[in-house]
Image: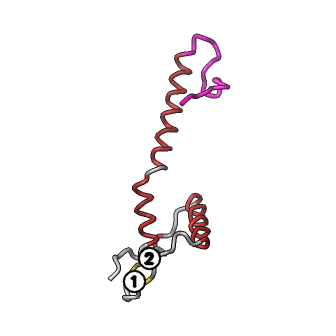
Amino acid sequence: METVINQPRDLGIGKELTNLAAMAKAGYTASRRLLDAERISHDPAAGTAALETLTSPVITSTCTRVPGMRFPDPRVQALLGACCAAAATSSPPTACLPPCSSPA
């Protein structure tokens, strides 16, 4: 990964060559923070578990079987896209989530 610092004064560092070590340290820190954020946001294990929860049938507390979502269905894709967009702006209310239990 390459980090370019166009305006080192934004980081409180002067443009002089004597500040090269400080700019390198600031660039390394920025790159490390970006890579950490990308690693956290791309956790395939969490994504697999979430997809399994959405596509598996559920038994409610009143013993009603609710079928899982058909993932290839375009309407399901649109709904999941809308949910992801909404989740990016706010946290979902946990009271509205269905209980997770295995099918009977």
Give whichever of discs 2 and 1 has the lower sequence position: 1
Q: Answer whether labels 2 and 1 touch (C-beta < 8 Å).
A: yes
* Mark 2 surroundings: few (<14), some (14-19) or many (≥20) residues within 10 A: some
Q: In which quarter of the image is residue 61?
A: bottom left
Quickly name the residue at label 1. 60
99 on left or right of 71: left
- From this view, report whether residue 48 is shown above or below residue 1: below
Query: Which corner quadrant holds the C terminus?
Result: bottom left
**Quick one: 68 or 84, which is closer to the camera?**
68
52 on left or right of 6: left
- From this view, report whether residue 47 is shown above or below residue 31: below
Percent across and percent down for residue 35 are: 49, 38
- From this view, report whether residue 26 is shown above or below residue 78: above
Q: Residue 21 carries which label?
A: none
Q: Quadrant of residue 56?
A: bottom left
Please give the name of the residue rendered at 45% of the width and 58% of the height, measured from the top-left corner. Answer: 47
Percent across and percent down for residue 65 are: 41, 85
Q: Give the range drawn in magenta.
A: 1-20
Judged from this view, the residue extending furthest toward the right is 7
> SS at mark 1?
loop
Percent across and percent down for residue 86 are: 59, 63
Quickly name the residue at label 2. 98
Percent across and percent down for residue 36 are: 46, 40
**Quick one: 2 or 75, which is closer to the camera?**
75
Judged from this view, the residue extending furthest toward the front is 72
